[in-house]
Amino acid sequence: MKKIIAEAEFTAQQNDDIAALSRTTGLCEETVRILYGRGIDTEDKIKAFIHPGKHAFLSPFLMSGMKEAVDLITRARQEEWSVVVYGDYDADGVCASTIMCRALADFGVNACVFVPERRNGYGLNVQSIDEIFEEYFPQLFITVDCGISNAQEVEYIKEQGAEVIVTDHHELPSVLPDCICINPKISDDYPYDNLCGAGVAFKVGCALNGKSAYQYLDFAAIATVADSVPLTGENRDIVAEGLNLINSKPRANYSNFLKKEERATSQSLAFSVAPKINAAGRMGDAGAALTLFLSDDDKEIYDYSVKLTAYNLERQKYCDELYSSAKQMLKEKGANGRVIVLCGENWNAGFVGIVAARLAEEYCRPALLFVKNGEGYKGSARSIDGVNIYEALRRSLIHI
Ligand SMILES: [Mn+2]
């Protein structure tokens, strides 16, 4: 289904503005009209949109907590603390872990990196924390792409005697963890809220190492595209610079996924690189994606690229099977009113989200897919424009 975006209608005054902007920017009126309709309605905004790049990067120190984080990491370096980075199993989490680990190493701190597997759930959890303490005795715990909703788990880490820095980009809960928190959504002087987890890790890298952190813009660009955050503002600058890097000095860690001799674009990152990284997590081996991105060994990089490509093929096969099974079930029992609600005994919880999205788009209505999980059910919901599925479920508007 193609999304149809209605053409904006403008007042006489706005049409005058558009004509004037077309003259000052040298762009044709049709282009300015499209930009204007999307809120890019001044000469400066148009210039920034058309010419994204590192000149527009914001100071990382505008983000609250950044200075305190740099001070604490400096202390960890001086006192040779054991440091652990804790990430997430999706492409954003793996890229964020990669950037944080490499930037810390450049700063002189050798950290151990841990990404949970999907079965452990998203974010910090007590079991993983226990395992990490048993193995590494961390004195400093740094989260990337998660942690902002884990006030309790952060307390648990502090009780074991480690300091904590949370870096995240997710929505803020009512109670923030009681530690240094870096998140662009915290109301502070940082003007751009839409960074992904790896974007935040990149900003920490810049705060630690200045421009030398720009060498990780490729990973930040992959994550920004993979996490589907809007390609506006600083995200646009990150992706533009990341693509320059990927097209001039591609790293072996992801270049096996790109088509040879073709200029990489945000589409190639979205369709050729990100699915392979995400597939590792979905197949229960996010650690493989992390190994691939952290490795500097050609043989290992080759082997893991092959492994991730195979995971992705397997993932596609599972999704196709689940999709056919869901379609068959839908044919037999029909939709639940205006909503698709299905449950499969043998479906894999890692793939129902992808299939729910496909059904929601195909039938243009919300889709909820469940799998049996012990006594209860576990599911994923995908909605369409104009239906807030979270609200609908919360107010019991959907009967399952
Ligand atoms: Mn993320």
Image (cartoon, helix red, strand yellow):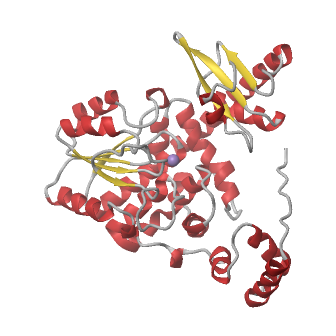
Q: Position of residue 292 (x, y in %)?
A: 48, 46
For residue 317, which quarter of the picture? top right
For residue 393, which quarter of the picture? top right
Q: Position of residue 244 (x, y in %)?
A: 59, 70
Q: Position of residue 205 (x, y in %)?
A: 38, 63
Q: Residue at x 85, y 58 (%)?
A: 6
Q: Nearer the viewer, residue 338 or 148?
A: 338
Quadrant of the frame with the N terminus: top right
Q: Residue at x 71, y 36 (%)?
A: 357
- Against 46, residue 188 (above or below) is above
Q: Is residue 12 visible?
A: yes
Q: Nearer the viewer, residue 372 or 311?
A: 372
Q: Nearer the viewer, residue 289 or 251?
A: 289
- Against 322, residue 147 (above or below) is below
Q: Position of residue 250 (x, y in %)?
A: 56, 62
- Position of residue 112 in the picture relative to residue 399 (left or right): left
Q: Residue at x 86, y 63 (%)?
A: 7
Q: Is residue 259 visible?
A: no
Quadrant of the frame with the C terminus: top right
Q: Residue at x 62, y 49 (%)?
A: 273
Question: Residue at the left extreme?
Answer: 79
For residue 277, which quarter of the picture? top right
- Against 344, residue 16 (above or below) is below
